[in-house]
Every structure is written in C-alpha cells, then in structure tokens.
Amino acid sequence: MKKYIIKRLLVSVLILFFVAFCIYGLMRCLPSSYVETIARQKSMQPNSKSYEEWLAQLNAAYNLDKGIIPGFFGWLGNALRLDFGDSWSWTVPVTQKFNDVVWLSFVINVITFILELGIAIPLGVVAATHQYSRLDYTISLIALAGISLPSFFFASLLKLVFSVKLGWFELYGLVGRYYNQLDAWGQFLDKAHHLVLPIVTFVVLSIGSLMRYTRTNMLEVLSSDYVRTARAKGLPENKVIFKHAFRNTLIPLVTIVGGSLPGLFTGGFITETLFAIPGIGYTSYQSMVQGDIPFSMFYMVFLSLLTLIGNLITDILYAVVDPRVRIA
Amino acid sequence: MSENNKYDVEKNVNVEENDKYSLNDDRRVKVLSPGAMVAKRFFRNRIAVVGLTVLVIMFIFSFIGGVISPYGENQFFYRYETRLKEIAGAKENTDYRYLIKDADAFTPLVQATSTLNIKSHATEFQIAGSRAVYTIEETAEGLYLIRIEGREIGAITKSILSLDSGTADYELNYNALKAHLGDQKTFTIDGVSYEVDETGGLSREGTEIGYVSEYVVSPIGAVTDFTRDFKEELQYFLESNDEAGHFIRDGQNEKVQFTYKNPESGEDEIYVVAYNAADSRWVIKRYQEEHVYDLYSAPNDEHWLGTDGYGMDMLTRLMYGGRVSLVIGFIVVIIETGLGIVLGGISGYFGGAVDFLIMRIVDIMFCIPSTPILIIIGAAMDALGVDPSIRMLYLMLILGFLGWPGIAHMVRGQILSLREQEFMTAAEATGLSAKRRIFKHLIPNVIPQLIVSATMGLGSAILTEATLSFLGLGVRFPFASWGNIINGVKDTYVLTNYWWVWIPAGCCILATVLAFNLVGDGLRDAFDPKMKR
C-alpha cells in the first residue's frame, strides 16, 4: 500500500511537471503580439511607463526574453519557492490575491457539496429501487436536464424569476447597499442572502451526474447475487436496500466523492461571473480575459494539481474501502 | 396465370398439409440482424425516441428553416419611430448686450463698468487711470447710450434686433431699438425711412426687414433657422404662458404644448416646450419621424420571435445559429473521435513503448484544465482581432483537440479486453494481416461505445461552444450561434425586459443537448442489453 502510494505520488509529480510545461509552452506560443498588446494597453494608462519599458518588464517578468525551456525552468524554480510573481491585473502577489478570494469559493462549494450529496444520493437510490417506474423516468430526466442545462441560461432564468419578477434576491454582488451599516450578524445574513441564487445554480447543475452515478451503481448492486440471497431469506425490502444494497453502493460513491474533494477549491467561472461573486472563479476569469499571465498560469497549474490529487484520492480510497481490490 | 390457377386447384387439397413443412418466408423464425436488434431495442425506449424526435425537429429547424425563412441571416430591419427631438432653445435675454460704435473707446472694460453703473443707476462715471468722464443716458426704456466727453461711443440694452438677411450696422441697430423701446416709432437714416410696429417688426419703406425682441431663439441640430413669424408666435406663447405660471420654475421638464399654424402649408405643427430652470432656458421639442433599426421589437406577425439587439429577425437568427452550433458540434466530434480512434487503437493494439507514450500524453491532457485554456485562447484571439470565420475554424480545431484523450482512453480499454478474446485468437490463427484484424475485427466491436460517446460528445461540444460564445470568446458576430444570441442577456435591461432575445435560444440549447444525451443513453441501453434487467 505504502509502496503504491509513493509510486503514484511520484508519477503524479512527473505528470504535473509535464502539465505545467505544456501550459507554459501554450502561454509562450500565444502570438507574441499578445504581450505587446497588453504592454501597449498598460502604457496607455495614465502615469504609466513607456511601451518599451512595459514590454521589457513583461518579458523579463515572465522570462519571455529567454527560450521556452530555460524560461520554464525559471518559472518552475520560482514556483517551487511558492513565488508565482505579481498579478498584472490585481497588482498584488498572485498567492496573496488567491488567498483573498479562494475561501469565499470554498464556502460556497462546501455548502453546494453538502446539498448535492443530500439530494442526489437519496434521489439516485429512489430511482434505482423504482426502476422503470414513472418516478424513475422523472428523476432521470431531471438529472439529465441538469447536466444539459447551460449554466448561464439557468442563472439568467433564476435571476428573471426570483430577482426581477419576485424581487426576493438581488441581481448581483455579494453584499447589499447597506452592508457597512449592519452589525456582524446582519452582515452574515446579508452575504448568505446574496449567495442563495448562486448556490442553487451550482446545486442544480451538479446534482445530475452524481445522481446518475448513484442510480447506475445501485442498479448494479441490486442485481447482484447477495441481494437476491437477502431477498430469498425473506428480509424486509427496506432492510435489503439500506443494509445490503446501499452499503455496497457506498463503495464507488465514497471513492468518487472523495476524489471530488479537491474540487472544492475551484470556482465556477460563469456562475460567479454572472452573479458578480468575487470568488476564485470570477477572479481567475477576469485575470484570463485581461491576459494576466502570472495569475492564469498559477491558477491553471493549481487546477491540474487538484485534478491529480483528486485522482489519487479516488484510487487510494478505492483500495481502502473495497477490500476486494488488490493493489499491485 | 390461368395455368397457375389450374395447378392451384389441382393441388388445393394438399395446400394445408404442405404449409406445415414449407420453408416460405412467413413460416420462418424471425431472425434479426444485430443492427436491427439494436434499432428495435432503441425504438422501444420511449424517452430515447422523444430525444430523437427533438433532434430531428432541431435539424429540420436549423438546416431547412434557414432556407424557408423569408429573411436572411444578416438582414437588418428598420422601423419608423416618432420621437421628441430638440429643435430649438429659447431664452429670454436677461444680459445686457452692447452696441459698439467706436470699438477703440468702448472697450470691454468700459462696457463692464457701464453695466455696473447702469445697475446702480449712476449717470456718470470715470475709469481709473483716465480723466475722461463717461455719461450714461437712458434714451428709451432699457436703452442706455454711453458717451465719452459728449461723444457717442456705444449703447447698452437687453433687446436684440435680428434682420431677415445681413447684419445691421450701429446706426440701424440703435435707432431700431430706440424706436421699439421708446415712443417714436419711425426714424430716418440717410433719407430712408424706417418704422417699427407694435410687435417689434422693423420695416424699411413699408417692407419688413427684421424685428426686435427680447428672446433669443437658437436652432439645435439639423434645423437651420426659423421664420420670424414662428419666432414671434413662440415668443408670444412663452410670454403669455410664463405670466400665467404654466412653466414651473423648479420643475425640470414641465411640458407645455405649443401649436403653431404654419402659414405656408396651413398645417398645425405641435411642439412641446419645456422650461429648464438650471440655465433659465426653454427647450422646444418636436415630434419627428426617424428611420431607425428595429431593435428589440416584441414578437409580432412579421417577426414571430421579435427582433434582437441588432435589429435582426430572432427566429431566422435562431435557425442559422442552430446550423452553426450543430455543425461545430459535428466537426468537433469528428475530429476528437478520429484522433481518439487512431491514437487509442494504436496504443491498445501495439502496446509497449507506444502505448506508454500515448497513455502518458492522455494522462497529461486529462490534467490540463480545458475551460481556462479555451478562455485564454479566446481572449488572445480577441486581442489579435482574428477574423470571425477563421476564429470559428480555430474554435473547432481546439475543441476537437482537447476532446480526444477521453475517447482514446476508452478505445484502448476496449481493444485491450477484446484482444484477449477467442475470436481474435481465431483471426490471428487464420493468418489475417494486422490491418485486417484491426479494421475488420477489432474496430467494429468498439463502434457501439464510440457511437454512444460521440452522441454524448455532440451534446457537450454544443454546450461548450455555447458557453464560450456566451462569454464572447467563441463564435462572433456576424455569425449567429445559440450561445452568442443568448449573450444579450448579460445586459440586465435585456434580461428584465426582452425575454424573446434569450429564452428561445436557451431553450434550443437545452432541448438539443438534452436530446443528444437522451439518444446517447438510449443507444447505450440498446447496444448493451446486459445492463437492462
């Protein structure tokens, strides 16, 4: 087990290295006039340096004056010391900006995650135990609709119904107009009130895949021999489902849910942007659109790291939860 | 025919007995080909059929709809709109104006000092640094004549003389104003006699050449000038309404209607007069018809789904948008499936170092976050100003390239498991070439999964394209796609007021993606009956 984890870790580090290299290479392969455009824009701003100075600074800051490979190792060397440079558009160190905004997204994601688990898993189980019934079709259709729903469309619909027509929530932002006049509890409620619609969007969009996953696995377990045996013993259906079947469905569920834990640190680009919630999704989207290379580079490598950790957790959990799985 | 009949009659007795053992088509056990089995199972799934129907409708809508629609993809529509347009500003002249006879003596300093002295009702003044004495004489009510040491240098008044053509010299100006403000209504200059009437009209030898008034009416915009009659009517209107208190001084836009009977055409022209307290000025507005883009018009008979923010027919845009979205989806899926089959097939079949290399590439590609990459490339293309049609091509290539690892992974897995099965051993034993084994025996067995993943992939490609276009980073105007049609909703005013701009496009995306997913699900179940209990 220990050997397996170490091996996986080493492979992950290697993959991360190449992923970072690919992202870096892509950034470098963007037409050079891209940086020039930004330098020009920056030099247009009042009280700014001249175009040449900006260009030289941008090139030097991002090691663009060297070749791709030396430039990459320069970046990597700094990154290993957790120095990701200064963000161009936020004008603070990348890690500082990241730390400022990521926790808001984290809170949103944790709430979303709990709601998602609480809704998707029971629905999946119900759909599986009532297979081919009207209930099953309805739940499956809703889940599939959630997957097929474009987030921007759903968020806009929510805004139209709940903000414009009913006036229950505000259209944008994290805090209301009188935020500063409220006491601590009031400020908390104000923020919570503003987060309702974004969280609903996240939950509806993410519920589908977990629900389908639960249903598929539950169906598989329900058709297995030990469930038939349990039924043959004359156990009540409730006991069969929750004691025998559901517990075994938990094996794949735990692994996939464990694997999605690192994802709590990411943010929804579109939903956060549409609701103007200043989380990591919104911030990184703004950075990318404005061509803030240090921040984008950092965030993309961070996302890759999260994916790798997620896969690692999934694999390890799979072995831990299911004793039948042997690790080579 | 007759021969046959005769034969039939003769054999009639034995027909029933023969039927029992005959091998006629209707007696045989129905055997369906695997394809027909799949089709049968698929069509038994009601939800999948609904999905397929929706897809067919969407295809007809997008590909045939554009042909049937009477409007073009980029056809703009216009409408006439009457709107209030400012045509003139009127102001009661409350400042003193100077009539200058001798510019050297009547300098701005003298002018300003004279005004101050008029206000304090002085009749004489001096200017520091000079011993000359200036005198002020009120020759008519509100008309002050300024003299230096008895010599006339200019005059000060609030009234204005405007001539129908040309400008008036000092003599004419002064005398006309004096006649208007004073009692004597006639005067003579160089033997020519002039007369000023009650309303301020100035005539030379009986013909009107100008008029005197206390109002300045200045045209705004395209209108160059107004007739004197209009100005007089307006002045009268303003005076009478002002006295009656119809203009509320602190209200910004108290509207009063002014009807002017045009003497030339004999028609009534209606103006709206508003008093602006901030600069004590009247603004005269008039209803004018304008030819404008037919923006955001609500659904009507001509435009069943209204028009969008460019003034184009929404329904037609949706049809062409659907065409773009579907074509992009298909090309992306073709690219990613093609790459996936080739690379996954090579990897799975040959194994070894090639497999290792390809699979590591797949691992890396899995880890690269695709949305940020697309956003960054989109933003870079924005910065470079890439042509919209080339941009669309790039978009397809990039989406296709980002999508292949999943398919390669699946193909490889399938091939690895198929390779070990008996039929492959048999194929090898019969001495078939590697090419034939791969393409005739392996690939056909992977096709079901490929079809399922391609169907699902179509849905997700359309969704990704829509998302990018929504962000303004995908398909660009003048091309329509469902995503960039819905883009309008970013404007809160559109979100609130013009549902037809974004809800139909959103429903199209939802319906199409959902239908692809339903069909994909249905196909999966149809191909893999084991999953069904």
Image: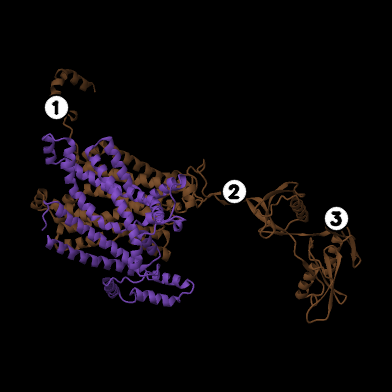
Give SS at disc 2: strand
Chain drawn in brown: B
Q: Quadrant of the C terminus of chain B?
A: top left
Element at label 1: loop
CA–CA distance in space, label 3 to label 1: 123 Å
For disc 1, the marked residue is B22
Residue located beneath label 2 in the image: B80
The image shows residue B21 at horizontal and vertical percentages of 12, 26
Nearer the camera: disc 3 or disc 1? 3
- In this rendering, does residue B388 appear at all? yes
Q: Is residue A268 left or right of residue B26?
A: right
Q: Earlier in the sequence, mark 3 or mark 2?
A: 2
Left or right: where B24 falls relative to B499: left
Q: Mark 1 is on which residue type?
A: Ser
**Residue occupied by mark 3:** B198
Pinpoint the chain carrying mark 2.
B
Q: Look at label 3 and name its amino acid.
A: Glu
| Same chain assignment for discs 3 and 2 | yes
